[in-house]
Amino acid sequence: MKKKSAREKTMDYLAMRDHSRDELLKKLKKHDYTPEEIQIALDSVEESGWLLSGEALAEKVSESLHRKKKSHLYIVQYLKAKGLPPVARDSEREYDKAQILLKSHFSKLSKSSDTDTKQVIRFLKNRGFDGETIAKICKRKND
């Protein structure tokens, strides 16, 4: 069977899901394509409009991760690993996600006073929430 061209392989990857230029570059290098073949393939899909800009893809990926209640720190690290630019932090959205996670995680406890502040802090820190969000949650919990 004939080996697919770098352009065909690139289109296969993009058919599965959106990829950043860096991700495609790494994946194509694993298939022993020459740097010239890779460059031509990436330029071709970019000119065709099949490759989203870094900012557009970062926004799309971050929205997906926000829906999964991932913290801003997690999202920024995920985007960095994919070779995408960071997105702006929305402190209200972070607070809302943390509240939802706490309600679902600690729903088994009968009273909110049963939930120790240290447990809340540890739970949120382990999920990558920043100190500002954790302090805001703890302040409102103790009020």
Image (tube, grey):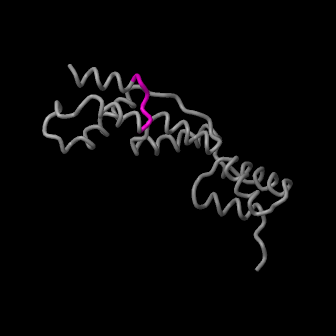
Is 130 colored magenta in this rendering?
yes
88 displayed left or right of 41: left
- Residue 73 falls inside the magenta stretch: no
Q: Would you say 104 lies left or right of 25 here?
A: left
Which residue is pictured at 21% across the width and 42% down the height?
107
Q: In front here: 32 or 4? A: 32
Main secondary structure type of the part rendered in magenta: loop
Query: Which residue corresponds to the image point at 61% horizontal and 39% vertical from the top-left?
Result: 80
Relative side of 114 to 4, left or right: left
Which quadrant holds residue 27?
Answer: bottom right
Measured along the vertical axis of the image, is residue 89 above or below residue 41? Answer: above
| Quadrant showing the C terminus | top left
* Rendered position, 141 above or below 77: above
Q: Residue furthest left?
A: 110
x, y percent for residue 1: 76, 80
Query: Which residues lie in the magenta part?
Result: 127-132
